Image (cartoon, helix red, strand yellow):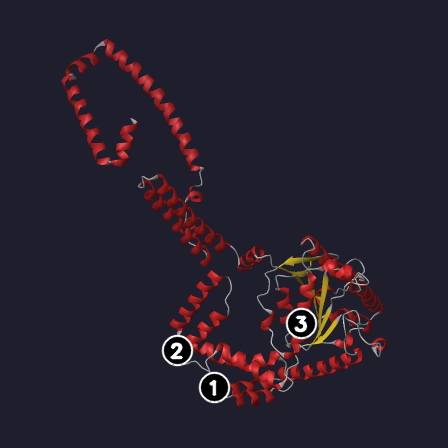
Amino acid sequence: MPRGASLRYICEPKKFFQSVGEQLEKFYDIFKTTENQNLELLKSEYGRVLIEKFSSELRAVLSQSQNGVEREVKSISRVDLDSIIQHPDEIVPDNRRESDFFKLRQKMFQNLYESMNDLSKINDPYERQDEALKVVKDLVEVKDEMKKIGMSEKLRLLRSDKLTDNEYYEGKQREIGEFYFERKPAPAVKIDDVIGKSFDKPKSHLNEIVETGEFSRLMTFSAPSQKVKSNILLIGPYGCGKTELARAICGDKRVIGASVSVASTLTAFMHESVNNVKRVYDSAKDLRTEGRNLKPVVLVLDEFDGWFSRGEGTGTDIDMAQIENVLLEVLDGMGDYNGIVTMAMTNKPKLIPGGIIRRFRYVDIVGELSQEERAKMLEGYLTKSFPTQNIEQTHYSKWANTLEDAPGDVVRKVVDEIHFSLVPKFIREHPSEAKRIEKVLYQRENTAKRLGDKDVSYIKSRFDNYKVFVDAVKVDNALDNLLKQPHIRLQIEKAREVYADAHRLVDELGVQTGFGMRPRSNLFDLK
């Protein structure tokens, strides 16, 4: 079949068959006029020989053709046609991420198609070039959005940190004898977010450490011993805010933040816990080296007392004694650990040996609130998230007295009780509005990477429109329910014990004076 005919058949099949019919009709007319002559020829001797020869050749051709057809049929039958058929499940997105990705991809191709058409109509080369640059810029932005959608939230945050030179790591153990730091998104907590007068002193100390850490060579070589101790120990009960302060300093762009849970470095294998102490500091040193020694590494050691908790068995006692010796070395700066700032945290100060405590430049008690601070903290939590009605300042003072000796975590839990009594009810009663708020927050989060105070204010304004508010009765009920819970009462009692132990410890250390110097009075009498 001629190529043109096949194309006409595809484009205009009706005309194609009409043309074939006309050709057959012409052939029949010609054949009709020669029909008698053809019959006479076939009856002759020559015709019989011709027919016999033609039949023989025709049978041979048909036999070969039949064999070829059978081979083709067998070959086609072996083809798995199901594997090349696209099923609907293969093109339907599995999740929202894929759905959004496909929409953006479709948008990109549609924009590209329309833009090429528009550009082809512009005769002026300079105008066409300017318009092409705009098109490319728009396409790059869409492509970047597609890339972001393909990333997990962790990767998106890490990408933002890398662009702003903000480094934060968490310590991990892979196997026995192997410790490493894994990069994580930097905490979004700011140092000013941690409130309370007891945090003023550690904030000041940390700011001094961070500011001078940028000038490690100047600080080191101007020091009498050419070693600078910038270690800080934070003492406070569970939920007092010391972890938030640590997260805030780790999220500071001026330092390389690195956090380690001491409990994760302890192991039952003989001497491995001791080796892990050294590995932690060596890994922190590597982080500083990889950062070209331009930033100090703030090494946050949570549950610091875990390294000194004596267990049963001679092996454990030996390991704990060796851990103490290793820490004495690294905190003294032996092994060239300049630029590594140890920020240790504990709620069991009595377990930490006196020799270790003396290696810290600062020992600060944190999270201890006055009644006035508890009142302000409760007011801050309430008014930030919810509209309030009929609440006077005297109410906050009364509630603060009820929460006497409670750490900040318990104060926050009062508002958590109110939150869970109001917000689920709002979602049930106003589902369409709740979905709209969620959609707005989702779009804002995609644009700004993180939600912040402006978004909290937006939620608060929507609550106000729907008369979702907090009054004194709701706070009284939440406070009453909370203090009935045994673990909350135990948390408050533990906080009292921790602060009593911390104050005794600080009294024995004496008051700090000057650049980390302390009076000799009771300093060397610690057990």
Q: Earlier in the sequence, mark 3 or mark 2?
A: 3
- Residue 2 showing in the rendered view: yes
Give the left or right position of residue 467, taking residue 118 as reference.
right
Callout 3: 10 Å neighbours few (<14), some, many (20+)?
Answer: few
Q: Which residue in the structure is indicated by mark 1?
A: 471
- Residue 260 showing in the rendered view: no
Marks 3/2: CA–CA distance: 42 Å
Element assignment for label 1: loop
- The amino acid type, in three-letter code, at marker 1 is Asp
Marks 3/1: CA–CA distance: 37 Å
Of badges 3 and 2, nearer the viewer stands 3
Element assignment for label 2: helix
Marks 1/2: CA–CA distance: 16 Å
Q: Are marks 3 and 1 in contact (CB under 8 Å)?
A: no
- Please report the residue visible at 38 percent of the width from the left and 71 percent of the height from the top: 432
- The amino acid type, in three-letter code, at marker 3 is Ser
In this figure, what is the number of numbered marks?
3
- Please report the residue visible at 69 percent of the width from the left and 66 percent of the height from the top: 209
Decide: is 397 above or below 139: below
Q: Which residue in the structure is indicated by mark 3?
A: 204
Q: Residue 4's spot in the image, x, y percent?
A: 28, 28
Q: Earlier in the sequence, mark 3 or mark 1?
A: 3
Q: Could you tell me which quadrant the C terminus lies in? A: bottom right
